[in-house]
Structure formats: C-alpha cells, structure tokens
Image (spheres, coloured by chain):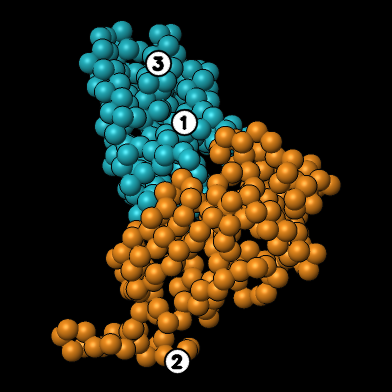
Amino acid sequence: MIALLVRDLRLAMRAGGGFGLGLAFFLIVSTLVPFGVGPEAAILSRIAPGILWVGALLACLLSLDRIFQLDFEDGSLDLLATAPIPMEGIVAVKALAHWLVTGLPLTLAAPVLGTLMNLESPGHYWIFITLLIGTPALSMIGAFGAALTVGLKRGGLLLSLLVLPLYIPTLIFGAEAATRGTAGLSASTPLLMMAGITAGSIALLPFAAAAALRVNLR
Amino acid sequence: MELRVENLTVARGGVPVLEGLEFTLSPGQVLILRGPNGSGKTTLLRTLAGLQPPLAGSVSADPEQITYGAHADGLKATLSVEENLRFWASVHGIADIAPAVDGFNLRGLLERPSANLSAGQKRRLGLARLLVTGRPIWLLDEPTVSLDVASVALFADAVRAHVAGGGSALIATHIDLGLQADTLDVGPFKANAQRPRADGTRDAYADFDEAFS
C-alpha cells in the first residue's frame, strides 16, 4: 500500500502529473474575485471565507477524474485488482494521495491567499482549520465519484454532476464554521458536523468505491 | 497449486460466450488457449483471474495464486523501467527484481522512462512484471504481441523456467511458442446462440456472430 502511495505521489510530481493544477486554479480564483467584486475591503472580508471554500472545492473537483481513469486506461487498475492489496485499500490510498497532492496544498495556501481578500485576523486560522478537516472528505467523496464513472470516456461532466451534490454539506458546514470563527462567534457546531462528515466518508466510502470499481472492471 | 475449472460459463456484457468449460491446469503444465478472435479467450482469462464473476460453474484456484497478463501492460509512461518494475515488485512483497530484469533483457533500459520504449520493449517490461509477482499460476493474454523473434524466445525461456519451478501457465496465443504444451481449443465450448430460448425467440446476436464465424 505504501508502494502505491509513493508511486501515485511520484506520478503527480512528474511532468503532466497534475500536481499544482488545483493550486493554480485556486490562485486564479482568489486573485480574480477582488477584481470582480470591487476593492471595498468590508465586502471582501465578509465574503472571503465563503469564496475560499468554494474555490478550494472547485479546485478539488478539477483533478478528480485522474484518480482512477489513468490507471484504468493503461491497464494498471486490472493488475492492481489482482494484486494482494484489497480494493478498499487501493481506494483509500488513492484518495489519500489525491488529498496530499490537492487538498493539503490548498489548505496551506488558503490563509495566504485570504490576504488578497482582506481576510480578518482570526480568519486565517479558521480557514486553515476548516479546510484541514474538510478537504479529506472532498477527496474521499471524489474518489467514490471517480470509481463510479471510471469506465466512461469523457466521464468528467457526469462525475461533476454526481459529486457536487455530495459536496454541498461539507461546503455548508465548512464555510459556516470559517465565517463564524472569523466573526468571533462560536463555530464548534458546524465544525463538529463537518468533522462527522469527514469521519463518515473515510469510514464508509472506501467500501462503496471498491464495490463500484469491481463492477466497472467486469 | 492446481487450477480446476468445472462446468464454467463465462459472459461478456451478460451474454454467455463460452459454456460448459472443464479443464485442469496442474503445476508444471502449460496450456495453450486457442480460438478465433472474439471467441471469448480474454473473457475466460479475466473470469479465471477473478476480475469478473462466472455466470455458472466454479474455478478452484485462489485468486491470490494467480497473476494476469493483460493486453495492456499497466506501465506508467513517466516512470522509468526500474521504477515501474520495483513498484509491482513491492506491491507483491518481492525485493529482488534482478531475475526479471535479466530474464527479459532490460538491463540496458533501466533508467529510461517507459514513454520512450518501443512497443516490443514495453511488452518485455510488461512480461517481466510476471516474474516479480511470485505467483504460481500465469494467465497470459496474447503475450507475444509486438515481440520480435529473439524476445519471443526469451519469453518461452521464462515460461519454461517458471513451469520447471512448479508453476503453471495458461496462454492465449495464435503463434507457436515452441513450448511443450497442451492445447485447449475453446471452439467446442462456444455458447450456442442459435439454440432457441424457452420462449421460442432467438438470440439477437446470433446472426451477427454467424457472419464472422
């Protein structure tokens, strides 16, 4: 399983591997929003947590179809399915690799990019914490969607349509926690709800995704 | 480890392609799978490898004993030959890749990215993967595609060494590998699409299949 993780990370770092794709998209969104909304600091700092969360979510969505599609196309997925790693383990490792390559860089970059939107002082801390807890759920749910659509040519649109509704609870609770935390209010309820979604996704979705993969490999 | 197949029916997309298959693959045995294109050889191999469930019948072997060599080699273009091979070796818990490297004459290519390999070199790397799985039963789907004569000989040597060590191989191929092998022709096991169904209708694909047979 560690070999698979190392391979996926190595592939992501090589040319055309997709590392930085989500990060670049996130950077573009955070840079463009102030131009679109206008320079009023009060409005920007009010919408900053929500914009950062939506940006991170869309950046995450961008690279989902790579999770299984590339391995499916070159035959590795067939060979992995017959390897001594359980399918659930393959899904979990691939989701983890996706998070390390996409979710973690987004989480680290968000407080810095928040400065572009005049994010108020405790907000940097809150956007970091909420993304740190929320992005694993985005990767895991995304891996499930990718497993469902793996055999389809140009399945990206269907993948987005499947995954976006599942992302909404994470987005609502994550952005709410970040907004409340930034405003100095108690954010523990949305934070705990989001942590629950993340924990539930990590516990259950590898099994669902593995079942979907087995069906798609037939 | 013996692979015993009893009354097996395999299906592609829910339509039976081969039915009533009975054979045994014993340790030390090479079985050549023959049959025209589209006769269900790949479907049979995928079923035996555990990638899809059989429609009926049973396969006795544990999927953990089987390694499957597909049409696609499962190589990553941006990884070097050595990285590709080491990955599959560590997935299967094997540390030493030297026998696989030497067995398929890859020593001079180790540093090269797989993207820059020729079709035959890619295939050799794909076949070298078999040696780093350490599994006794090989199921190979047209393993000699794009190999030159010398590489086919390397492959035949690898199969000979494998069966001499107590392994076995089921190989779907159209060429003569020069191996001491038994032959299994899938023709007689073709699912009979012409046979009327219980309700008297005929299979919609029957005429289509006949046109190619």
Disc with the residue nearer the chain's start (3 vs 1)? 1
Q: Residue at x 31, y 25 (%)?
A: A199
- Reading the image, the residue beneath label 1 is A96
3 vs 1, front mark: 1
2 vs 3, front mark: 2
Q: Residue furthest left?
A: B199
Taking depth in this image into account, of B123 and B67 the one nearest to the observer is: B67
Secondary structure under tag 1 reads helix
Residue A203 visible from this viewpoint? yes
Name the spot of residue A147 as percent of width and height, x first.
Answer: 39, 47
Chain letter for the orange colouring in the rendering: B
Q: Which mark is residue A129?
A: 3
Q: Residue at x 35, y 37 (%)?
A: A206
Between the C-alphas of marks 3 and 1, the distance is: 18 Å
| Image-based side of A23 in relation to B100, left or right | left
Name the spot of residue A100 as percent of width and height, x first.
Answer: 51, 28
Pointer 1 indicates a residue of which chain? A
Q: Amino acid at mark 1?
A: Leu
**What is chain A's hue in the picture?**
cyan
Between the C-alphas of marks 2 and 3, the distance is: 65 Å
Taking depth in this image into account, of B56 and B123 the one nearest to the observer is: B56
| Image-based side of B135 in relation to B80, left or right | left
Name the spot of residue A71 as percent of width and height, x first.
Answer: 53, 49
Q: Amino acid at mark 3?
A: Ile
The answer to whether B100 is drawn above or below residue A126 in the figure is: below
Q: Amino acid at mark 2?
A: Ala
Residue A142 visible from this viewpoint? no
Q: Which mark is residue B211?
A: 2
> Same subunit under labels 2 and 1?
no
- Alpha-carbon neighbours of circle 1 within 10 Å: few (<14), some, or many (≥20)? many
